[in-house]
Amino acid sequence: MARSLRIDFVSDVSCPWCVIGLYGLEQALKRVGDLVEAEIHFQPFELNPDMPPEGEDVVAHIQRKYGSTPDQAAANREQIRARAASLGFAMPGLSEDRRIYNTFDAHRLLHWAELEGKQTALKHALFRAYFTEGRDPSDHDTLAALAGDMGLDPAVAREVLGSGRYAEEVRAAEHLWRSRGIHAVPAIVIDGHYLIQGGQPPEAFEQAIRQIAVQPA
């Protein structure tokens, strides 16, 4: 009998390592087959909660936040692009001329999408929009269009975005995960007990899932 697992995937839509972590996790779940029945819930985390609406140039942002030189940032981008490509995800939008944006509204839309049963589809769409297509994940027109593409009602999406709905819920969730010690993403919490940090390869996720699956529920 398959072991049921709840997987809380704490991440930000502007985090490239979160893409790598999600694709690695999903490939691992395919590898373990019928051993587990996993239910993924995407939890909000903002890498840059104070980011202004207009965003910030990525090179300036990385230098200010991490002290990285342009050469170091370029090498890191190339490493990330290569890792993502190995998992089947193209990242042409991960370029030195992109901008970093505020992602709070994207998290509110993801909260609504979970209630509508479309959260995973929208999460993938947001990753593609930003990292593959270079679109702005804070723009309400972009967000409503992505929601519509995933089978959600774009008019309702606009109402959610324009009204500030689910802001309290998202803030509460962010606080909850910070209070549990999550200060970097991706953070993958399985059954509220087992923590896997970072953009791990499928093999690492597979090993962890197989070990967890045989533990007492």
Image (tube, rainbow, N blue to C red):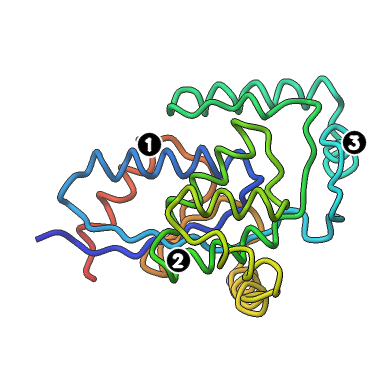
Residue 71 placement (x, y as % from top left):
82, 19
The mark lying in front, picked from 3 and 1, is 3
Q: Is disc 3 in contact with disc 1, using a CB cutoff of under 8 Å?
A: no
Which residue sits at x=25%, y=49%? Answer: 210
Between 42 and 73, the one lying in front of the other is: 42
Task: Relative to 68, say whether 25 is above or below.
Answer: below
Residue 206 placement (x, y as % from top left):
31, 42
Residue 130 placement (x, y as % from top left):
64, 39
Element under label 3? helix
Element under label 1? helix
Which residue sits at x=57%, y=63%? Answer: 155
* Residue placed under numbered mark 1 in the picture: 202
Task: Relative to 107, say whether 159 is above or below.
Answer: below
| Residue 158 falls in image quadrant | bottom right
Disc 3 marks which amino acid?
Ala
Task: Relative to 74, say whether 156 is above or below.
Answer: below
Disc 2 marks which amino acid?
Glu
| Residue 88 falls in image quadrant | top left
| Quarter in which the N terminus is drawn | bottom left
Disc 1 marks which amino acid?
Pro
* Residue placed under numbered mark 2 in the picture: 114
Using the numbered discs, state the Cα–Cα distance from disc 3 to disc 1 in whole angstroms.
33 Å
* Residue placed under numbered mark 3 in the picture: 60
Which residue sits at x=59%, y=24%? Answer: 81
